[in-house]
Amino acid sequence: MRCAAISLALCGVLWLSPQAAKAVECETLEHSGNSYAVCEVNPATEELRLFRADPTGIVYGHFSELETMLGAFDKKLAFAMNAGMYHPDRAPVGHYVEDGAEQMRVIPNAGPGNFGLLPNGIFCIRDRRADVIETRDYLASRPDCTHATQSGPMLVIDGALHPRFLPDSTSRHIRNAVGTSIDGRRAVFAISDNAVTFYEFAKFFRDVLKLPNALFLDGNVSRLFAPRLGRDDRGRQMGPIVAVVEPES
């Protein structure tokens, strides 16, 4: 293992993971005339985490840069997706925690754009589980997240669609999101293959993926790294990235 190539601190985080990652299950699903690439992760058995910048502050920005860093630790990506909205300098818009260190506080108030379309939420990765938690519930419960990223709007909240979504909406974009099961053992990531509305995307998470809570991640920068689907999407630089990491061998 080539720890000196990056930093001893990051080396420890990657090397001392409690359990090696197993296969990420990915497939293409269709619903109501739309197509979606879907990848399911079990946080209890796979090394699911967030990445944004290296210890010197240089933003990874692209899956290829993250892969290069991981290669220095004899690790590789099994899956990755953009994981929340960010400012022009790639700093997160909302709450962000990486390796237990908070980099950005929770933003609880309404605001412009999709992020501020309350209720929004936080994707929280902790010991052997992952959860999408509505922001007000997150503030009330203060879960001990090893990794967390805030985005919005929520797509599904306790089995109900976001109240602002309209069945006849004409706003269509390529979109990506994450949903989780009640027990925290299913974290399901999806990206639309064609432009979809919020209403269509939310119904897909609730009615097809059967997930009670789901969080929109982005619609301007929606990209997926999934070798099982032959996907390694390129484009402009990203901010936070959610990934499953596994040994190279």
Image: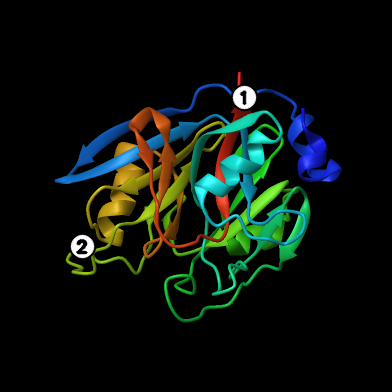
* Kind of residue at badge 2: Pro
Query: Which residue ends up furthest to the left in the rendered image?
Result: 33
Snapshot quadrant of residue 89: bottom right
Q: How many marks?
A: 2
Say whether residue 1 is left or right of residue 235: right
Tell me which amino acid carries mark 1. Answer: Thr
Between 120 and 18, the residue placed more toward the observer is: 18
| Separation of marks 2 and 1 at Cα, in angstroms | 37 Å
- Res. 237 in view: yes
Q: Is residue 201 left or right of residue 106?
A: left
Check the image and tell me how it is coloured: rainbow
At label 2, counting other C-alpha atoms closer than 10 Å, the crowd grade (few under 14, some 14-19, many 20 or more) is few
**Residue at the extreme right of the image, as rendered:** 8
Residue at numbered disc 2 = 167
Look at the numbered discs 2 and 1 and tell me whether their residues touch, using CB distance below 8 Å: no
What residue is pinned by disc 1? 45
Q: Secondary structure at mark 2?
A: loop
Q: Position of residue 226 (x, y in %)?
A: 42, 36
> Mark 2, mark 1: which one is toward the viewer?
1
Quadrant for the N terminus, please.
Answer: top right
